[in-house]
Image (cartoon, rainbow, N blue to C red):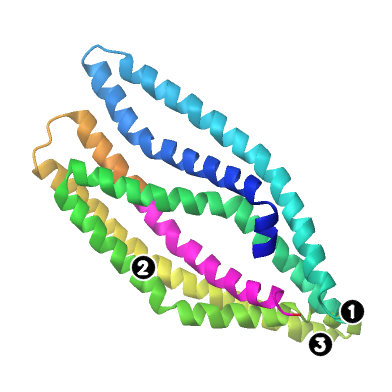
């Protein structure tokens, strides 16, 4: 994978630059909405014009990135697939088939989820910094909540890796199982595949539930604090609550990306095998 990125380093750098630009523009939306609201209340349309320009810039960058990404990652998939399959033993047809699917998953993560990961990471840092300028109490609460949520997912990381390994082991047997034309073997294979998928889903459900309860408490606290601190401008209150919502969206997504990272790390180890 590293050799592939080196081969396409210029195009990958351009993709990453567009992702960062798109993420930076997204961070500004709640702030500019607040400016527009305060401007309208005071009889000015300047804030609305700024919001319109920001929206247009976000559209141009977003569309441009998606057009470039689809072509770039199509080439990466072809190159990485040929490189991986050519290094494997010729008789391992079941593993080859499974690893083509794993390569597709790896490339799709880079194309579809990497922008969201960068967006969420930069968004989380940017939003927390902006919250610090709006209300210090909410800022300190956001730091504590972030630490708690990441701790929840870190504690279960070993189990996540184990379940992904078991699921991928079973996936690599699929073509051989189908080729055997044995209903009992196929039934057992499908049962094991679903078992690991269900266990991964159950683990995610538990982690998400605990994290969501923590975030709901944080949201309610932020609303109470923002009003209690005597913020008088409606635009400022709206911006703060919007940033709290944006914080929740970003912080709840990042642990899911961490779980994807653990899965892809296990897949990467398989793809590097000869």
Residue 161 in sight from this viewpoint: yes
Identify the residue at horizontal 55%, vertical 54% (top origin).
Answer: 114
Mark 2, Cα crowd under 10 Å, few <14 / some 14-19 / many 20+, is: some
Residue hosting label 3: 185
Where residue 188 sits, quadrant-wise, is bottom right
| Residue 48 part of the magenta-drawn span | no
Count of numbered badges drawn on the protein = 3
The CA span between labels 2 and 3 is 40 Å
Identify the residue at horizontal 64%, vertical 72% (top origin).
Answer: 268
Q: Is mark 1 on a helix, strand or loop?
A: loop
Where residue 175 sits, quadrant-wise, is bottom right
Foreground mark, 2 or 1? Answer: 1
> Counting residues from the N terminus, which is met first, the one under dot 1 or under dot 3?
1
Residue hosting label 2: 150
Judged left or right of residue 180, residue 107 is left
Q: Where is residue 116 in the image (x, y as percent from the top left)?
A: 51, 50
The magenta region covers 247-273
Q: Where is residue 22 in the image (x, y as percent from the top left)?
A: 49, 39
Residue 181 in sight from this viewpoint: no
Mark 3, Cα crowd under 10 Å, few <14 / some 14-19 / many 20+, is: few
Q: Where is residue 122 in the image (x, y as percent from the top left)?
A: 40, 49
Which labelled disc corresponds to residue 145?
A: none
> Counting residues from the N terminus, which is met first, the one under dot 2 or under dot 1?
1
Residue hosting label 1: 90
> Counting residues from the N terminus, which is met first, the one under dot 2 or under dot 3?
2
Foreground mark, 2 or 3? Answer: 2
């Amino acid at each position: 994978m590293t050799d592939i990125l080196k081969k396409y380093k210029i195009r990958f750098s351009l993709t990453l630059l567009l992702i960062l630009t798109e993420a930076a523009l997204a961070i500004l939306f709640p702030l500019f909405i607040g400016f527009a609201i305060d401007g309208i209340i005071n009889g000015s349309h300047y804030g609305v014009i700024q919001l319109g320009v920001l929206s247009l810039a976000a559209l141009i960058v977003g569309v441009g990135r998606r057009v470039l990404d689809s072509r770039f990652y199509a080439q990466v998939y072809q190159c990485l697939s040929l490189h991986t399959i050519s290094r494997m033993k010729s008789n391992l047809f079941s593993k080859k088939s499974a690893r083509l699917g794993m390569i597709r998953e790896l490339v799709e993560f880079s194309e579809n989820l990497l922008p969201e990961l960068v967006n969420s990471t930069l968004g989380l840092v940017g939003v927390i910094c902006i919250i610090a300028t709006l209300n210090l109490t909410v800022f300190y609460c956001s730091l504590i909540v972030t630490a708690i949520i990441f701790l929840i997912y870190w504690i279960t990381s070993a189990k996540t890796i184990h379940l992904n390994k078991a699921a991928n082991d079973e996936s690599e047997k699929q073509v051989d199982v189908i080729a055997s034309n044995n209903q009992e073997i196929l039934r057992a294979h499908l049962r094991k595949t679903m078992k690991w998928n269900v266990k991964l889903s159950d683990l995610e459900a538990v982690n998400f539930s605990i994290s969501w309860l923590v975030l709901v408490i944080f949201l309610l606290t932020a609303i109470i604090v923002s009003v209690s601190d005597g913020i008088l401008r409606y635009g400022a209150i709206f911006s703060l609550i919007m940033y709290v919502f944006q914080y929740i969206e970003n912080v709840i997504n990042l642990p899911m990306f961490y779980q994807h990272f653990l899965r892809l790390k296990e897949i990467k180890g398989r793809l590097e095998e000869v």
